[in-house]
Image (tube, rainbow, N blue to C red):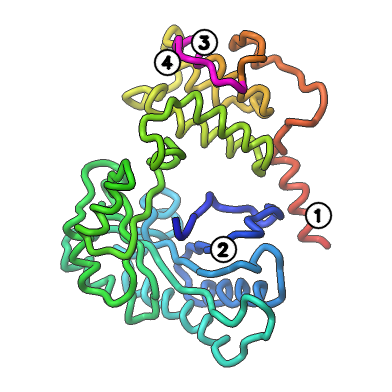
Amino acid sequence: TDICYPDPLNHDDSDARENGELTIQLCGCEPEVLYDATKTLIELRNSGNMRCNQLRGIDLNLGCPQKCAETGCFGAFLAEKKPELALECIAAMRRAIDSFQHNRSLRPNTNTLPKLSCKIRLFETVEETVKFAQNLEDAGCEILALHCRQRVDKHDGKPDLLAGKLVSKALSIPVIINGSESATLRDVEMDIKNTQAHSIMIARALLENPRLFVEPKSDPAYLAAEYLDYCEKYPPPSPLFIQRHLRWIFRKYLQPAEELEEKNYDYNDWKLRLWTFLVRPYIKTIYQFRQVVHLYVQMNGSMLPTSLKNLPPPSFKSIRHYKQQDGSNEVRTNEQIEKNCYSIMNN
């Protein structure tokens, strides 16, 4: 693995990957604002700011297909509907980075300027995609990530890896292919060979199974239990992170085949009930999350992970009404995070 993209980080995440290289992704459609944001990030890095000290790349989101991107005119909507403006945004970010070219600090980690990258999706035709990718390179993009599906496909359907190959061959900068269905290291190697890409980006498959490349058939309960051990050792910013990650791990096993309105839920189906129960706001301690995993094992009739064997038999009711005796394994709430953010902004 060369680069890891985390979930969006709140600026209060003071343990923000201090020992790892950091790529920060920006989104927006105003070149001047993106210019200022890019300069600010580099200035923070050059000042020794612990949150940006390891900044190695700045990325522009030109691939998001979600409703929020349509509303804000960024992501794939900006690339498709206003491609010239998207190019202006990349050019502005390029100017911001280049403005430090002859004015570098002698501080550690600042001799190499952050790489400018962006992520896009396929356009309606391969020709349009190749042309836009070439224009991005001309505007100053140094690394291109390409999701080999169109915006309307989101994450569904087969990726068009042939289109990815044509884009890779048309550019002189590294191209990273996203959206492939690689399930093993061998698959990754084959996709790199077939697309002639620099590398492969994998997200959803690794969220579902963080052990994908060493144990492709891992049991979800064992994955979840191990994940919670790490959460206890390295607490995430809020319970939401745990809820979302556990939902990814259990998605194939609990999520209903079709989207249902809550009024149509059949709570006699324990899988559906557990799927919705997992994200209830009163579940916010490591103990409760472990008991949710324990409940899955109990109802599924599967093997119990070792780290859960000393826990009492759970029920929906016992998990819901669990009272934390001390704060040793409680994850910070969003309210606490917002309070800390407010404190930082006013100091």
**Residue wearing tag 4:** 265
Q: Secondary structure at mark 4?
A: loop
Characterize the local packing of mark 4: few (<14), some (14-19) or many (20 or more) Cα atoms within 10 angstroms. some
Secondary element under disc 3, as helix, strand or loop, is helix
Q: Which residues are magenta?
A: 296-307
Pick the residue in front: 136 or 262: 136
Whether residue 277 sits left or right of residue 86 in the image: it is right
Tell me the distance, in whole angstroms, between the alpha carbons under discs 2 and 4. Answer: 44 Å
Residue at screen point 61% across, 75% down: 42
Amino acid type, label 1: Ser
> Which of the labelled discs sits on residue 343, or is there none?
1
Quadrant housing residue 206: top left
Which residue, given by chain and number where applicable, does mark 3 sit on?
298
**Quadrant assignment, res 286:** top right
Looking at the image, is 107 positioned above or below residue 188? below
| Distance (Cα) linking label 4 and label 1 | 42 Å
Q: Which badge, 1 or 2, is on the more N-terminal residue? A: 2
Q: Are marks 1 and 2 in contact (CB under 8 Å)?
A: no
Instruction: Give the x, y percent position of residue 49.
Output: 71, 69
Q: Secondary structure at mark 2?
A: loop
